[in-house]
Amino acid sequence: MTLIFKMIGILFCLLVLYVIWQAQELRHFNRTGYQVCSDKLKEVHKWVVLADLHLWRYGRHNERLLQAIREETPEAILIPGDLIVHTKPERFFVAEELIKQLTAIAPVYFSNGNHESRLEDPEHANYVPYQQLKKRMAELGVHILNNEREIVKAGADELVMIGLELPLSYYKKGVETPLAPDELSRCLGEPDASRYQILLAHTPKYIPEYFAWGADLCLSGHYHGGLVCIPGIGSVVSPQFELLPKYSFGRFDEGTRTALVSRGMGTHTFHIRIFNRSELLVVTAKPEPCGGIQ
Ligand SMILES: [Fe+2]
């Protein structure tokens, strides 16, 4: 009996230590730098990618996050979805407050993640608060790209910034949903192969299809790095309950095309990150030849 009480006591202490450690860990984020090259580029560009913030705050008014972004002096700030949590309209002010500061640093490009897509349904209880937030974001100058594109003049280059918003059926949990063959051309139209095309695509699940469509650079998040990451093996499970998901974080190359998947900047529902710290991506894009890959 004494042994059982000792075991329970040890487990309880370990649990308390884990809770304290986890709370501390969630207060930090890493900067992950990537370098990409393309013969479609004439100049060097630098972008910051802020994925899956989920209304998270780093310091009061997100000051630590804003300072980290300011220090990078990015040409643009790219947000491939899940800025919010769809069940927390009372906290949407956090997103608005952040966006206001971000637009003062650099142009912001945003596309819906699954949390925002849910709130595009007029039947949803939080439809109105999200439409109000989106309206406010547009007023603040955010380029909202939901199955839309913009040609961005950046020095001597003309970039194509594209935001993909896939139907919510592609986010179903526990089911393998292949991308319909015509889905990307239905959502995005035809690619513009003469220019460097940057695709903000919330889910990384269909990276090979994004490459096949013609994206030069895909930026994704969604999987939050898989919550728990085993060193040497990778992520354990995706938010869709897919075991050992292939595209949960990191860099994926195919010929001249690159996909960068962020571990995300926030959490929701399960506030767990083990060996999987939040990350802010900093992407430097250079003309060919650009030397070694970072
Ligand atoms: Fe997501």
Image: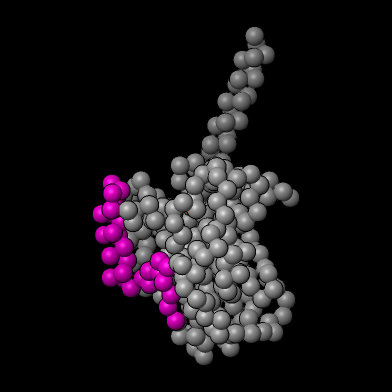
Instruction: Tell me: residue 242, above or below residue 84.
Output: above
As drawn, 105 above or below 287: above
Q: Does residue 86 appear left or right of residue 122 in this picture?
A: right
Q: Nearer the viewer, residue 162 or 21?
A: 162
**Do we see residue 15 in this rendering?**
yes
Q: Residue furthest top?
A: 1
**Residue 67 spot, x, y in % from top left:** 46, 66
Residue at horizontal 28%, vertical 49%? 123
Of 192 and 241, nearer the camera is 192
Would you say residue 130 sits in the magenta stretch?
Answer: yes
Quarter holding the C terminus is bottom right
Residue 149: image quadrant is: bottom left
Check the image and tell me how it is coloured: one colour
Is residue 49 visible in the rendered structure shown here? Answer: no
Q: Is residue 194 magenta?
A: no
Is 245 drawn above or below residue 157 in the view shown? above
Q: Between residue 76 and residue 119, name the one nearer to us.
A: 119
Q: How many marks?
A: 0
Residue 101 placed where, x, y %? 36, 67
Residue 178 image-quadrant placement: bottom right
Q: Residue at left 59%, top 78%?
A: 285
Which quadrant of the rendered structure holds the N terminus? top right
Q: Which residues are magenta?
A: 122-151
Looking at the image, which residue sits at the far bottom?
A: 156
Residue 259: quadrant of the picture = bottom right
Residue 18 vs 36, above or below: the answer is above
x and y, in percent, of residue 18 in the image: 57, 36
Residue drawn at x 47%, y 73% as measured from the top left: 189
Please report the residue visible at 60 percent of the width from the left and 21 percent of the height from the top. Answer: 9
x then y, percent, for residue 195: 54, 83
